[in-house]
Image: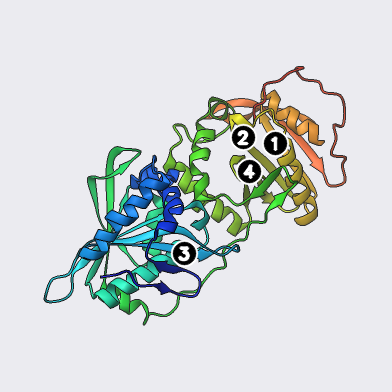
């Protein structure tokens, strides 16, 4: 059998060709695909081309391993942004059968609905053209992005199996989801759910850094930033920060924060490379005011990127959100955090003894403010150490 061409007007599933080798290799090397799907971190264009010619071609010939390229136009013409597959396809002579769904996306395919559309097309082909009765979906426990995608596509959790998954090359527990053809077809008869518009995170840039929405592709860098000793010392990030923490933060906590308007979290990225430098947020807990939180990775500290990010956020808060006051708190003696606030014009209001919870232990905290209309330059001479360590704080 040969691979058909499937599409819905936005997403196309088609056969891989030799011309896709570089894109396929990049998908295999993607950090999240290596971590959660065990793909080849050392894949090259040549090894990808050989896999397309040999493994993928034989799978279609035998009919038991059917892998598609996922193609979309992101503005510069069609490009391969992922791959979906039907694995372990079993089609008995009497009809029916089963298969397992697999998916790997590149960073450009995440957060756009591409995965959902690709899986919908794949399931329609499996239940319609192939006529299978049931599909399975396997994910490692902790891979919340995969679980969320499976559930959006109508799969339900069938079992949690010890040792049935793997993460970073180590054995882990696995989730198994399932969906039947009858359930799939019944979805079309069910009333459409009430849809809640997804929050839109604006992109802010000064040409050097960009404030944008966090993406699943940022998860690896976020883990590294939050495991850094200075982040652990001066912030409230969870101890022993894991990929599961990062994915939960990206897919759930930040999305909910934007949806409610209570916590507006931005990724801070290099404008040239889009690489994650850190995170910054506005905690909007009372009308007309908000608190700023910030956490940068070690490589970005001392580069000026944090100050540029704060200035972008301050301008957004006062000109776009029409806030009147911004607050900044830092645990004493986080001189790096206090100096960053001082550079942007925040004024020290005082020290609150025991006002900060240092992982359950009372600690002193500094409180600084900046009002709309204040100069965004130091309000007075610096009164701290001449060369404070460049610590940053998430509030």
Q: Nearer the viewer, residue 214 or 373?
A: 214
The answer to whether the residue labelled 4 contacts the one labelled 3, judged by CB atoms less than 8 Å apart, is no
Tell me the SS state at disc 4: strand
Q: Are marks 1 and 2 in contact (CB under 8 Å)?
A: yes
Looking at this view, name the residue that lies furthest to the top: 386
Q: Give the alpha-carbon distance from disc 1 to disc 2, as whole Å.
A: 9 Å
Question: Which residue is painted at 37% across and 56% down in the image?
Answer: 147
Q: Which class describes the residues within 10 Å of circle 1: few (<14), some (14-19), or many (20+)?
A: many
Note whether 358 is above or below 387 in the view shown. below
* Quarter of the image with the N terminus in it: bottom left
Numbered label attached to residue 269: 4
- Picture quarter with the C terminus: top right
Q: Secondary structure at mark 1?
A: helix
Q: Looking at this view, is 293 or 39 the one in front?
A: 39
Q: Mark 4 or 2, which is nearer the eye?
A: 4
Say which of marks 4 and 3 sits in front.
3
Marks 3/1: CA–CA distance: 35 Å
Instruction: State the image quarter where residue 178 is shown.
Output: bottom left
Residue position for label 3:
71
Q: Earlier in the sequence, mark 1 or mark 4?
A: 4
């Amino acid at each position: 059998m040969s691979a058909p061409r499937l599409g819905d007007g936005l997403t196309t599933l088609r056969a891989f060709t030799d011309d896709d080798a570089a894109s396929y290799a990049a998908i295999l090397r993607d950090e999240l695909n290596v971590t959660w799907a065990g793909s080849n971190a050392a894949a090259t264009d040549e090894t990808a081309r050989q896999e397309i010619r040999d493994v993928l071609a034989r799978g279609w010939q035998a009919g038991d391993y059917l892998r598609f390229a996922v193609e979309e136009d992101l503005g510069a013409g069609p490009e391969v942004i992922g791959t979906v597959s039907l694995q372990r396809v079993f089609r008995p002579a009497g009809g029916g059968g089963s298969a397992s769904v697999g998916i790997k996306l590149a960073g450009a395919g995440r957060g756009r609905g591409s995965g959902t559309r690709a899986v919908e097309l794949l399931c329609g082909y499996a239940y319609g053209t192939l006529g299978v009765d049931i599909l399975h979906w396997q994910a490692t426990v902790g891979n919340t992005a995969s679980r969320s995608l499976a559930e959006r596509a109508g799969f339900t959790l069938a079992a949690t199996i010890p040792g049935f998954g793997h993460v970073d090359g180590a054995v882990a527990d696995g989730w198994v989801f399932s969906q039947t053809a009858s359930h799939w077809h019944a979805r079309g008869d069910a009333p459409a759910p009430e849809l809640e518009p997804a929050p839109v995170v604006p992109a802010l840039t000064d040409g050097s850094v960009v404030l944008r929405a966090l993406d699943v592709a940022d998860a690896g860098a976020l883990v590294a930033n939050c495991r850094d000793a200075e982040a652990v010392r001066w912030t409230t990030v969870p101890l022993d920060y894991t990929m599961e923490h990062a994915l939960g933060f990206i897919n759930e906590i930040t999305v909910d924060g934007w949806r409610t308007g209570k916590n507006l979290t931005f990724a801070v990225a290099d404008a040239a490379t889009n690489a994650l430098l850190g995170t910054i947020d506005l905690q909007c807990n009372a009308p007309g005011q908000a608190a700023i939180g910030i956490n940068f990775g070690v490589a970005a500290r001392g580069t000026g990127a944090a100050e540029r990010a704060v200035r972008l956020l301050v301008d957004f808060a006062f000109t776009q959100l029409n806030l009147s006051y911004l607050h900044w708190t830092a645990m004493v003696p986080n001189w790096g955090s206090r100096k960053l606030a001082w550079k942007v014009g925040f004024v020290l209001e005082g020290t609150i003894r025991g006002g900060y919870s240092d992982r359950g232990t009372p600690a002193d905290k500094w409180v600084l403010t900046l009002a709309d209309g204040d100069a965004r330059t130091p309000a007075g001479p610096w009164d701290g150490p001449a060369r404070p360590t460049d610590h940053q704080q998430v509030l």
